[in-house]
Amino acid sequence: MSGQHTLESLAAEAIALGESSPRAVLGIAGSPGAGKSTLVAEVLGRINERCGPGWAAHVPMDGFHLADDQLRRLGLLDRKGAPETFDPAGYAHLLERVRTETEADVYVPGFDRLLEQPVAGALVVQPVARLVITEGNYLLLDDPPWLRVRRAIDRVWFVAAEEQLRIARLTARHVEFGKSASAAQAWVADVDERNAVRVAPSRLAADRVIVNGASGWAFLE
């Protein structure tokens, strides 16, 4: 199956999930740099093209990053992106809320990569939404603060990427948003890869594994 056919199949699967209940939540997990946000954009675009604008909405885990002021207070700024630098309780509460509050707009936080900060009310889940797609590294993490997040999600896909490509993309992203090449490489090695090690075992708990490789998207058989 070609990468485009894989994406069409994933969009159809996501639509079926959304049609199975008044509002469903689909999670997309994976290590830093695996391509989660890219997959969300590809699938979300196909869904809303077929079903109409707003039928599927996006709620990123990155909106629940703690702000830098809080990370400084906690002594965690140099570990930004690790599980303990997020607000999983707030994230879980919002996922629970979007499942049940279906008759009014629900505003959700986004994340500004230029500022490297969460932005309150940046995104919206409209009443027309039948599917909420949420993406982040730690949706399947088997730690108590994150288990409530998993319970609020109907199905989770895990994005796996070839390691060399994943690290190259991740380094390039850090450079794009302001780090020098050497600083980007150091951050990937010291912070992102430590987080990737924590995420990797969680793929065993996923409902589906999707490979993001040099030749495109594919299902893991």
Image (tube, grey):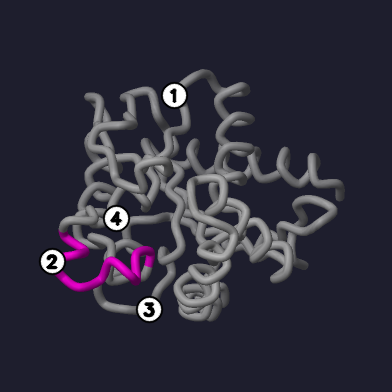
Residue situated in front as seen by the camera: 75 or 216 = 75
63 within the magenta span: no
Q: Earlier in the sequence, mark 4 or mark 3?
A: 4
Kindly report the distance in space between the C-alpha atoms of the residues bearing marks 4 and 2. 14 Å
Q: Mark 1 vs mark 3: which is more N-terminal?
A: 1
Please tell me how crowded label 2 is: few (under 14), some (14-19), or many (20+) other residues with Cα within 10 Å.
Answer: few
Q: Secondary structure at mark 3?
A: loop
- Image point (81%, 56%), residue name: 214
Q: Nearer the viewer, mark 4 or mark 3?
A: 4
Quadrant where the C terminus is found in the figure: bottom right
Q: Position of residue 96 (x, y in %)?
A: 25, 50
Judged from the image, the secondary structure of the residue bearing numbered disc 1 is loop
Disc nearer the start of the sequence (2/3) = 2
Figure quadrant of residue 212: bottom right
Magenta residues, start to end: 70-81
Q: Is residue 97 above or below residue 47?
A: below
Label 1, label 3: how far apart the Cα atoms are? 32 Å
Q: Contact, CB < 8 Å: mark 1 with mark 3?
A: no
Q: Quadrant of residue 89?
A: bottom left
Q: Give, as a three-letter code, the residue at label 4.
A: His
Q: Which residue is mark 3?
A: 142
For disc 2, the marked residue is 73
Q: Residue 174: x percent and y percent?
A: 53, 54
Residue 65 is labelled as: 4
Secondary structure category for the residue under label 4: loop
Q: Residue at x 54, y 75 (%)?
A: 189
Q: CA distance from mark 1 to mark 4?
A: 25 Å
Residue 172 shown left or right of residue 91 in the figure: right
Amino acid type of the residue tagged 1 in the rendering: Gly
Of circles 1 and 4, which is in front?
A: 4
For disc 1, the marked residue is 54
